[in-house]
Amino acid sequence: MYLRRVLLGGSAATAAIFAAVAVGKKGGDSTCTAPAVTGKWHRNWDRREPKCLMNPSEINSEIGEEELKSRLNKYKAKATRHIFLIRHSQYKLDGKTDADRILTCLGREQAELTGQRLACLGLKYNQIVHSSMTRARETTEIISKYLPGVKKSSSDLLREGAPIQPEPPVSHWKPDVEQYYVDGPRIEAAFRNFIHRADPKQEEDSYEIIICHANVIRYLVCRALQLPPQAWLRMSLNNCSITYLVIRPNGNVSLRMLGDSGFMPPEKLSRT
């Protein structure tokens, strides 16, 4: 019913984006269509299967099987992407504007602990991308002190919002239904932009950090694992916790950690 309302009342672009995350027609793994939530793994979930990256003119009956195989190899991913999704630290909930919602003293301590944790993993991080909201930006500034030389960038796509109506519904959180129409396509765009297999030109495995918000992270996890996206609110994430996704060259995705905060002492944990 929700998708039907979008299709009837929303723009064509909005409808197309939500159709990508709703239950749709069944399709084989070899298609280049949007994946449906069917319980079967859709190999082209990120639209990066080699033949779907090829120009249609490269695929024709005149070339031989070996030539087609050679052309396809140019579009195959070679590297694995390791993506660390970090929820922002605790912040001042009473701020009237985003600029006023700065980190609390506890929040700054949480960011310090998370930065130390990421540093002690001994990984060569390629980049940090953070939400443009104040609490995510301030969390990034503290964490990045422990990761010198790692380039940082900001994205409005990662701002907090209401991705899709949760199932089952909850009584303590009921945004206006219009908010889903505004935030949903944007957060879906964040998924398409940041969660996918490596570019064919990428030769080495990458380790990337995304610092954003609980709603966004939970939605990204559901989409990456091809779980019903309406399940996003069934998960809970502590402030500055670490969620770890691995995306293999063949498109397989695994969740190594969800909301890990075991590196923090109990008195430093919070969810606000």
Image: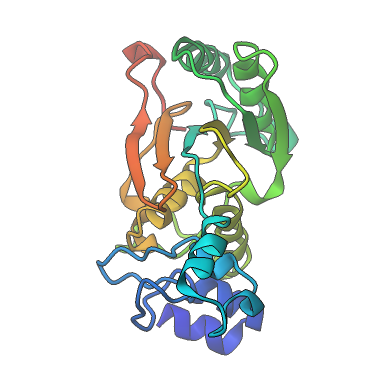
Residue 86 position, x and y percent, is: 50, 31
Comparing 31 with 117, the one in front is: 31
Residue at (32%, 14%) from the top-left corner? 266
* Quadrant assignment, res 100: top right
Comparing 231 with 266, the one in front is: 231
Comparing 213 with 247, the one in front is: 247
Residue 26 position, x and y percent, is: 33, 81
**Color scheme of the displayed model:** rainbow
Q: Is residue 240 left or right of residue 14?
A: left
Is there any visible trace of residue 47 in the rendered image? no
Residue at (39%, 80%) from the top-left corner? 24
Residue 161 position, x and y percent, is: 57, 53
Q: Is residue 115 above or below residue 15?
A: above
* Quadrant assignment, res 223: bottom left
Residue 189 position, x and y percent, is: 61, 59
Q: Is residue 101 left or right of residue 170?
A: right
* Quadrant assignment, res 154: top right
Number of numbered markers: 0
Comparing 176 with 256, the one in front is: 256
Residue at (64%, 30%) from the top-left corner? 127
Q: Residue furthest left?
A: 39
Residue at (34%, 33%) from the top-left corner? 257
Instruction: Locate the N terminus and report the quarter of the image it occupies.
Output: bottom left
Is there any visible trace of residue 141 in the rendered image? yes
